[in-house]
Each structure stands twice: as structure tokens, then as C-alpha cells.
Amino acid sequence: MLEGKVALITGATRGIGRAIALRYAAEGADIAFTGQSQSEHWHSLEAELQALGVRVKGYASNAASFDEAHTVVKDVQAEFGRIDILVNNAGITKDGLMMRMSEEQWDTVLSVNLKSAFNYIHAVTPLMARQRGGSIINLTSVVGQSGNAGQCNYAASKAGMIGLAKSIAKELGPRGVRANCIAPGFILTDMTSALSEEMREQWTKTIPLRREGTPEDVANVALFLASDLSSYVTGQVIDCCGGMHI
């Protein structure tokens, strides 16, 4: 489904980003990915992707840095010749109630989650406009639509990613570039596995499908949005939450 396409995925060494990279590679896409350092996760991802027979290159980058994001995009273009798919997946949490939240907690989450998406979209816009085609996918969250106590910074960053994608869809639609969001719900990743078993059970009871989601569930939606199957879909938010947000 993605043969001949080049995908750039930020924050891809673990969790949802890793699952998306592997799903795309399995469908024939060449993969450029970013991470903050060449860790064990980085090298194992490279090996798994290369075993699927596609071209792969990782780039050490702080996604929140405007200059580093532009350098990565320039380097990917030089290495692969084009970028057809951009997945803005880099993200963190620094939870806390508003009355106790520090400025640093707010600024860091907004910078890593929202500004990084701006950085990479800003960098790929000229390239995709010249190509007259491309798919931009922001990994947001159901929290960005409904809010969540103790996550004002995270919810604001994810809501911002939705507004960003909808606006870019209107700006770049005439050039054949699409922009959409995926809003995962309770997905079993390193972030959520740190929760107690009791808390995870409580969350699961609120989900109509009565199970946690997996990174692969999200990757399947990302495949749809990256492929030509979604050629008439832009400016949308697709929830991947088992019905948690209805």
C-alpha cells in the first residue's frame, strides 16, 4: 500500500511511533525516523525495519528545536529524494493539577508536543507543495478533545495539534497535501504500563470495547491515512479509542 513512498516519523523508537514505522515498512515505505539518542531501542528498530527490505535511516534530533527539525528534513530529502508522509508523534507528559503546575511543566509539554509538530510541518511544507502531494498525520489524543483533570498542559498541546492539522488541511489542500489527526485513547505503551493494575482496570471499564488499545491498533489507522485509501480525507480527527470518546 505504501510502496515507493518515503515516511518521516518523529519519536519513533518506542511505542506508537515504533509500531507505525514497522507497519509502514511492512507495506513497502522507506522509513526516516527521529529520536533523541541512538539507544538500544533505536538500533533494534533499525534492524527490524531493515529486515523488511526497505531503506532506513535514523536521525538524532530534538523535535522541539526549530533548527534541528529543518536540518532533519533537509537531510532526509537529500538521502531519500522526497517525503510523502510526515507523522508527528514525538510527545511527553508532565502531569499535575493547575494549582501546582510549574511554568517549566507547561512550557516543556507545549514545546515537545505542539511546537515540534509546527517545526516539522513548517519544514516539509515547501517540499510537499512542490511535489503537489503528501500526507501529514498528527498524533493527538482523546484528551485533546475532552480535556482531563491533571493534564491541562498535555490536553492543550493535543488540542493545538488538532487546530494545526485542520488549518494546514485548508492551506495545503489546493496543492494536494492532506493533514489529519489520530486521537488515541487508552493505549498500552511504556507510559501507561507504569499505572497500577487497579487503575488500568478502572480505565478499561470506561471503554465500550472493554480492552486497552495497542500501538498496532493506532498504526493501522495511520496506515489508512498515509495510503491512497484516504485520498479524499483531510482535516479530520479519527479517534482510536475503543469507543472511549463518543
Image (cartoon, helix red, strand yellow):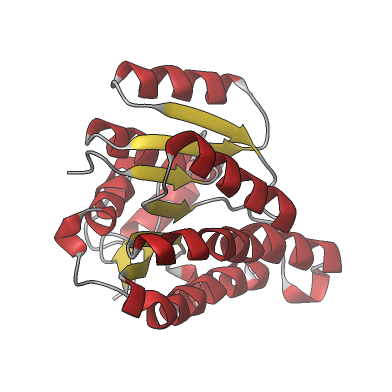
Above or below residue 195? Residue 167 is below
Q: Quadrant of residue 16?
A: top left
How far across and how far down the image is residue 156, in percent?
A: 60, 75
Above or below residue 167? Residue 79 is above
How far across and how far down the image is residue 159, in percent?
A: 52, 75
How far across and how far down the image is residue 65, in percent?
A: 73, 54
Quarter holding the C terminus is bottom left
Q: Is residue 109 left or right of residue 192?
A: right
Give me the residue at 46% from left, 81% from top: 167
How far across and how far down the image is residue 242, in percent?
A: 26, 59
Identify the residue at the far front of this view: 130
User: From this viewpoint, is residue 66 visible?
Assistant: yes
Give me the residue at 67% from left, 37% from top: 36
Nearest to the observer: residue 12 or residue 66: 66
Quarter holding the N terminus is top left
Give me the residue at 34% from left, 33% from top: 22
Give me the residue at 67% from left, 41% from top: 61
